[in-house]
Image (tube, rainbow, N blue to C red):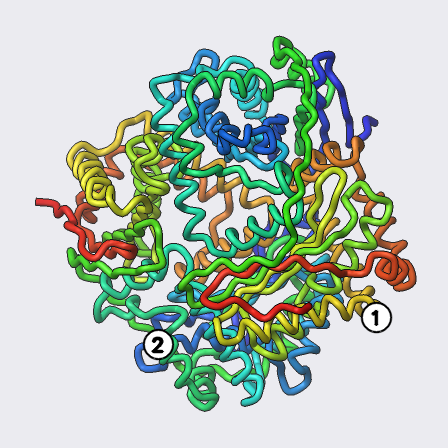
Amino acid sequence: MTEPIQVYEYENGLTLVTQRMDWVESVAFSLLVPAGCSRDPQSLLGLGNITCEMVQRGCGPRDSRQFVNDLENLGVDHSASVSNSHASFGGAMLADKLEAALTIHADLVQCPHLPADQLEDARLTCIQEIRALEDNLAQRALQALRLRRYGEPFGRSSQGALETMSRIGMDDIRAFFATAYRPNGAILSVAGKIDFPRLRDRVGELFASWRPAPNAELECVPQNGAPEHIPHESNQTHIAIGYESVPYCHADYYQARAAVGVLSDGMSSRLFTEVREKRGLCYAVYAVCHTLRDRGSVFCYAGTTTERAQETLDVMLHELRQLSCGVHADELQRLKARLKSALIMQQESSSARSGSIAADWYYLRRIQTLEEVGRIVDGLTCESINRYLAEHLPAEFLIVTLGQNALELPR
Amino acid sequence: MIFRHHTLANGLEIIAECNPAAYSAAFAFFVQTGARDETDAPSGVSHFLEHMAFKGTPSRSAADVNRELDEMGAHSNAFTSEEQTVFYITVLPEYQSRAMDLLCDILRPSLRPDDFETEKQVILEEIAKYDDQPPFGAHEKSMALHFGTHPLAQSVLGTLDSVSALTPDQMRGYFAGRYVPNNMTLAAAGNVDFAELVALADQRCGAWQPAPVQRATPRAAANRAARVFPNDIATQQYVVQIANGPAAEDDSRFAARVLSTVVGGDGGSRFFWTLVDTGRAECAVMYSYEYQGTGIYLTILCGPPDQTAANLQAILDTLHTVQRDGITRDELAQAKNKICSQLVLNSELPTNRLFVLGNNWLQRHHYQSVREMIESYHAVTCDDVAQVLAAFPLTECSTVAVGPLRELSIPKAP
């Protein structure tokens, strides 16, 4: 019997990571290209985003319209987006449509038309994204926090700015494509009903003419960590808090993840109980682990009306500090039940697995099986988590607020 | 997949689509009550009551409910729409009995005054949150304008005033009249032990007393009204247009779904090529929704304020053309492929399947397998689409705009 998880690295550097799931009818893929917005030159912020838009406007034998119509006709639930590290193209479909969908995406990364006569349409599309962000207040607060936490270019978001977007020309897009849309550093993950040997060979043929390009190292420019208030005449104040944690590749990652789970996983978690259930301070409150390759963070968020914002911030900070007093056995038991149930249910979704194995490869250079993660979760103890917390005290909180009034911050 | 059905003596119906190969089991109470049933009750009471179900019962505190859900590693939540309030829980199959015990219990909440006042604050925060974010209330304002005196004009969340004024006694009265076993369905999907499910339901819900329940389901009149609501904190302009469409009972709903996918699906549609691909709008989509007695086509446009009038003209031109010429065979085939593939992909998760199953049963008292649904879409012809266009013209629509604009000239069909 072949192993359900298989990895294959092609000569040009493209890595195929797969998980066979015979019990589903679907298959999902994610193609991660190292063309994230961290590669945007400072004077051309948004370049990665508009390049991602342009590569979808025709490739290989298809013009822009045929590209979309082919995917729609195949019933591919397709998407494209740009993160800090990657341009990602993904799709979920019935298993027999996979090869056709990959054929289209192989053309997309190897021979896009990049039609100059569609540059202005693509630019307007990207400008719509910048404008949309203006209206998404929670996201604005969290994006500002991420920039403070990681600095340039690793803390930036993909949209760019109106000013830089207006400067981008076809030559910039072609140059970005030539250097960033490369197979070395690219990951193709596929999960679902697949035949691995056939898929491996077919992917090899489809992506054979993709040529590697040099990988330029990026330098990090730290940002100042002072608190920030963004004035806005909204009903609610959006509170974003961040602090240092360990990255996904760290041996203690699951200790950190468990501590955040006690804070925020489920309806009996501390933040939900203290901020929402007991005090009714907000509708949405949460904390998540966020990771880069070499650094990690915890990001917390709450949205609450102006007059209750100070109390919300105070209660959140109190709970974050309280973590250093340790987690309790009953909290850990519930958290384990939630994590293990989520692991088992992940097997029902080819899309979820495809995303997970792609992320594993990027951050770990290997794939963790669900059984392996299950064993790590089983091995968590209050002692192990509390030992981690003693060594990694939640402290030096970065705080960004967006709303009518600035809040009083702890010294 | 095996469909099972059982009715308890008090009228509670239990339905399940059992799949022994699934990793999870999903359960839900679909209560036939929502904003449209609030014509004689305070606006927002259905949604507030949904929150209160998680705030404790005679044998459990709110903290107990939350703790037990997490002990099972359950994925659980609830939502309220114009015509349903749904409480669901997805667990590993070995937790079926415990999950059902909890789910049945929270359907008989205590509605304690202390919890009521605390949760009221959460609801008011929820209203403030939606007021601050896209589309800045445009959906509810457009439902209110389009439906006028029709029950579907009622807002799900209610207003700051209506929710602030609500009392526990008013909620108890509403609960007593609507949360009766003959007005709800217990649905399950995935790796479900049906015999045990029926036994558990009988044990926990068998004593619930039935009572007569009514719902008015009139057809809605056509409406071409238009209104502009200035909003100073929005950057983009948000427009919602509503036209009448086939009701939940109407078999032409399949053709309507195909039509809305061709006109305003999220990729490859006529709106997409005219407005989104060109960067003229951030978003331009059309969906069809069915309610009991009436249905709607909902068009959502979002984009720069200064281009809104021109974009609305482009939408009207698109609708006018499709109204006159119908859709092409290629468009028909592409829309069917998209819809049917989505159906299969969605049905892989028991929780998704549960929502379709329960909704079908509440709206039509009918079970349809995924295969049967696919056949229904495959049977749609260009003629069917022409007929639904004739019966429900897309150009007969009402319009609500929310955003920076103080005024907006809204193009009208001749």
The answer to whether residue B138 is above or below residue A345 is: below
Q: For the C terminus of chain A, which image quadrant? A: bottom right
Q: Position of residue A172 (x, y in %)?
A: 48, 20
Question: Camera-side residue: A328 or A104?
Answer: A328
Question: Camera-side residue: B236 or B21?
Answer: B236
Q: Position of residue A72 (x, y in %)?
A: 44, 29
Local packing at callout 2 (Cα closer than 10 Å; few below 14, some 14-19, many 20+) is many
Q: Are marks 1 and 2 on the same chain?
A: no
Give me the residue at 26% from left, 38% from top.
Answer: B385
Query: Which corner quadrant of the image does residue B316 belong to?
Result: top left
Which marked residue is nearer to the observer: mark 1 or mark 2?
A: 1
Chain hosting mark 1: A
The answer to whether residue B349 is above or below residue B132 is: above
Query: Is B395 left or right of A363, judged from the image as shown?
Result: left
Q: Position of residue B231 (x, y in %)?
A: 30, 60
- What is the three-letter code of the residue carrying label 2? Glu
Identify the disc placed on residue B30: none
Tell me, yes or no, whether the two marked residues, 1 and 2, touch with CB atoms within 8 Å.
no
Query: Which corner quadrant of the image does residue A287 belong to?
Result: bottom right
Q: CA distance from mark 1 to mark 2?
A: 48 Å
Chain hosting mark 2: B
Q: Position of residue B116 (x, y in %)?
A: 53, 84
Please give the residue where the numbered disc 1 appears in the rendered image.
Answer: A325
Is residue A123 among what the camera can see?
yes
Please give the residue where the numbered disc 2 appears in the rendered image.
Answer: B38
Give me the residue at 79% from left, 68% from top.
Answer: A331
Query: Which corner quadrant of the image does residue B387 belong to?
Result: top left
- What is the three-letter code of the residue carrying label 1? Cys
